[in-house]
Amino acid sequence: MSARTSALETLIFGVDIQSGDVRGDAPSYAVVAFDGENIDRDVVSYRKLRRLIDREEPDILATDNVYELAADKDALVGFLRDLPSETKLVQVTGAQRPEPLSRVASRHGVPYGKKPMKEAEAAARLAAGNVGHEVSAFTNTTRIKVSRGRSTGKGGWSADRYTRRIHGAVRKRAREIESELDGAGLEYEQNVTEKYGGYSRAVFVVEADPHEIPVSTGRAGDVRVEMARERTDGIEFEPLAKRRDHVLVGIDPGTTTAVAIVGIDGEVLDVLSTRTADTAAVIEWIIERGRPFVVAADVRPMPNTVEKIRRSFDAASWVPGTDLPVDEKQHRTRKEGYDNDHERDALAAALFAYDDHEEQFERVARKTPARIDTGEVIARVVGGESVETVLETYEEDDGGDEEDATESSQPERSPEQKRIARLETQVERLKSHVSDLKGTVETKDERIDRLEGELTERRSEERKRVRRKRDITRLERETDRLERERDEAYEERDALAEKLDRLKELWKLDHSNFADVEDEKRDLVSVKPIEKFSVDAIEAAEDAYGLSKGDVILLRDASGAGPKTARRLADRSPRVVLKEGGLSDSADEVLFEAGIPVGPASEVTVQEIDELAVARESEVEAVIEEWHDRAEERRRERNASMVDQVISEHRAGDNQV
């Protein structure tokens, strides 16, 4: 299949199953690509069809039955989820109860054939003519989830730092996404799960489709970002062609332009206020919502911008006798919803125009038969025609005058002919009655549609109310959590204050030349503990409170160290090393050669305060003195041993001679 064309700036794929079954192993499909002028045809497998859709990203994928593309509802939901974000799936034969494709094609004048390729082409042409229903299983709300990209692990001495880094990365990415959403002007709700060092998860619920959200998904380092559209309650079918009724339009021009749409029954249908849209964009917005036959302003004379829009629709104008006072506008719009004064002024103009014409609308509606579009008659009457003239045009279209002329030219009829004529008249009258009843049914259907719309709106409002209640509950929980954190912070502050006082005392002990150190504490010296005699533990102590020359070191577990670890400790030049447990011979030799005194911790009374500790200076000095005595004895023994060894080697040499 060739590359995308752009005759209508829209690419439509028509699809019909060629052979096999989607529930089987290898279905094939007839595919027609249609852009309004050119047609490309091909027969592809299901897998190739999916690749073709992903590559070309058609605006519409049209078919006569969506269950030719998916085996069941769950599979259809998966199919819709995998479609490109801007591709619509359209069933051209109706909603839940589709008509035969041949009947729909005949009704809309589209060529039809029974072969799959012809049916695919008919589906594409119908979708191009806005025939059919869009199939959807997702709302226009997208959920973005930011979470950890890897496990925090089971532990280890650096587990806390590792966990803190991951949670910090999640929080950083969440804040970046929040900034991106704010920059794009998107509405969203955010819910975060706080953990040690940051967030373990952050969820954004955004009121937009995925292709409108400037956020990239995937895993990057410690963070994973996932994006998914939210599901509807079921499979929904939305008609492509929207009905456009006759409406009254109120406009308030200016730096901020406001527009209000009101139906012929006085119901407010929509309101807009914008600072960026130009006149063409405003006209396009109005066209999407109805056919204006009255354009109104709240001031006299009508502003040029409003007059320009009125002429573009060839609509009647309405302006008040004098500029509408603010209090009257507020009173007239008190039951309507609006966001600012500009929307209020546009609403007031449209509603006052409706009030002026209300009796006329009711009078025309009473005279208009049910089979005739009341809105069309009202629009023509407001435009200057009389009701009778408008209704006569409908009667002429039905051929009434032609029948009268034929009857007047006919000769005298026999009784049988008269009876036949009466019966024919009765038949026509009954047909007219049937037509009126059909009009009544249509009116009822419209009322049902309106009531269903109101019901949908009420449900939407109820969902919003529930969402607001949920938000209030969430905020209350957040408030409670913050209050608990505040209380915990106060407690931690008090504890840290006490700890600071103790640390000040320890600092004074290390700087004994200060005069404010109490006499009974002058005999104390600070001790710096090291949990294990290992390189990692030495570096951890270095990071925690620093190791410097002349420190008193407490080794809580002196076993297992080799010469490398002993040299690392000796490089710090401690004053003395107090050990708990046995010290390896190699480590003891390194410390001895470095002149580092080593003694048992049991001979010194150590008092610990949080991470730090203190000991009596006199006891530390005693350990050092004892080590020096042992060291002197050890050196004498070593010298004696060396002398014995030399003598032994000398005697061994004499014997050999």
Image (cartoon, grey):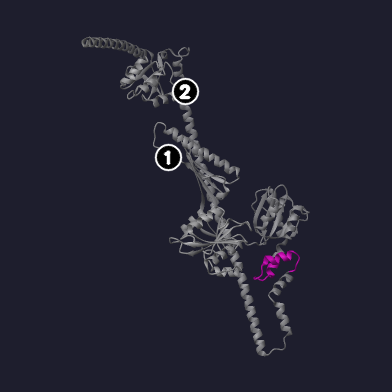
Amino acid type, residue under disc 2 in the picture: Leu
Q: Upstream in the sequence, badge 2 or badge 1?
A: 1
Q: Is residue 256 left or right of residue 480?
A: right
Secondary structure beneath dot 2 equals helix
Verify whether residue 378 appears in magenta. yes
Residue 524 position, x and y percent, is 40, 15
**367, above or below 633, in the image:** below
**617, above or below 214, in the image:** above
Secondary structure beneath dot 1 equals loop
Q: Quarter of the image holding residue 118?
A: bottom right
Q: Is residue 21 left or right of residue 375?
A: left
Inspect this view and state whether residue 381 appears: yes
Amino acid type, residue under disc 1 in the picture: Ser
Residue 339 position, x and y percent, is 65, 49
Label disc, if present, on residue 151 of the rendered structure: 1
The residue that mark 2 highlights is 500
Q: Nearer the viewer, residue 392 or 186?
A: 186
Q: Which segment is the magenta one? A: 362-386
